[in-house]
Image (spheres, rainbow, N blue to C red):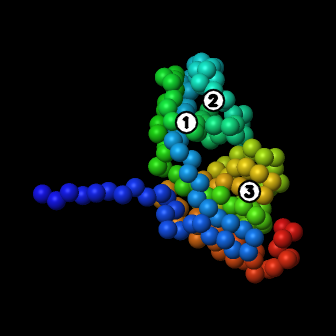
């Protein structure tokens, strides 16, 4: 009987980091991620239970320190463990690829997303990146995190790389976008 040793790989293993011009693409390890969707009628109880362990429920389209809005009555919580919650809770830790776009991040993403990117830090947008459904979070004035399904990691890196190369090819003109 042979023994098989499995090696865990991140979604963007071998693809990132990469720097093109003044843009850096890097994989983000979010650690444990949990989808939390409160059961109907007990939403406040769920928010209170999370607050007791230091997790703030974010407003629509926002990210708190350890949770991000993810859709109607759904958030993604970044925590090792969660208390018992009156909610549907699923482990999403290996389901997503998260890529940080820093430098002229707005210039790169403007070529791929159909939304305004001049938003306050902490804004979460559910949108398309190219042809992929994504969650795009503004984490600093020059840095966004783009989250897509893990199976789309290679495509995301490809599209972001192409956009960064197009921006770099424009030279100084692209810096104002």
Q: Eyeballing the image, is 170 above or below 28?
A: below
Between 16 and 162, the residue placed more toward the observer is 16
Mark nearer the N terminus (3 vs 1)? 1
Q: Secondary structure at mark 1?
A: loop
Per the image, the residue denoted by label 3 is 143
- The image shows residue 1 at horizontal and vertical percentages of 12, 57
Q: CA distance from mark 1 to mark 2?
A: 9 Å
Q: Using residue 42 as the reference point, say whether residue 101 is left or right of it.
A: right
**Circle 3: is it few (<14), some (14-19), or many (20+) Cα within 10 Å?**
many
> Can I make out residue 86 in this image?
yes
Q: Residues within 10 Å of mark 1 (few under 14, many from 20)?
A: some
Between residue 15 and residue 151, name the one nearer to us: 15
Q: Which residue is label 2 attached to? A: 55
What residue sits 73% from the left and 75% below the top?
A: 21
* Lower sequence index among marks 1 and 2: 2
Residue 79 circle label: 1
Mark 3–mark 1 Cα distance, whole angstroms, equals 22 Å
> Disc 2 to disc 3, how far (Cα)?
23 Å
Ranked by sequence position, the earlier of labels 2 and 3 is: 2
Image position of 36 (left or right of 174): left
């Amino acid at each position: 009987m042979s023994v098989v040793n499995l090696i865990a790989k991140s979604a963007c293993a071998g693809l990132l980091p990469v720097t093109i011009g003044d843009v850096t693409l890097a994989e983000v390890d979010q650690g444990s991620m949990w989808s939390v969707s409160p059961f109907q009628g007990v939403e406040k109880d769920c928010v209170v239970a999370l607050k007791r362990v230091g997790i703030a429920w974010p407003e629509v389209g926002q990210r708190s320190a350890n949770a991000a809005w993810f859709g109607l009555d759904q958030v993604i919580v970044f925590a090792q463990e969660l208390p018992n919650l009156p909610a549907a809770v699923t482990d999403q830790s290996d389901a997503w690829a998260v890529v940080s776009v820093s430098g002229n991040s707005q210039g790169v993403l403007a070529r791929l997303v159909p939304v305004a990117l001049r938003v306050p830090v902490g804004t979460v947008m559910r949108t398309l990146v190219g042809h992929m459904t994504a969650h795009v979070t503004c984490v600093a004035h020059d840095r966004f995190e783009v989250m897509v399904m893990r199976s789309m990691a290679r495509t995301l890196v490809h599209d972001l790389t192409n956009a960064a190369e197009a921006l770099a090819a424009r030279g100084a003109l692209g810096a104002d976008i």
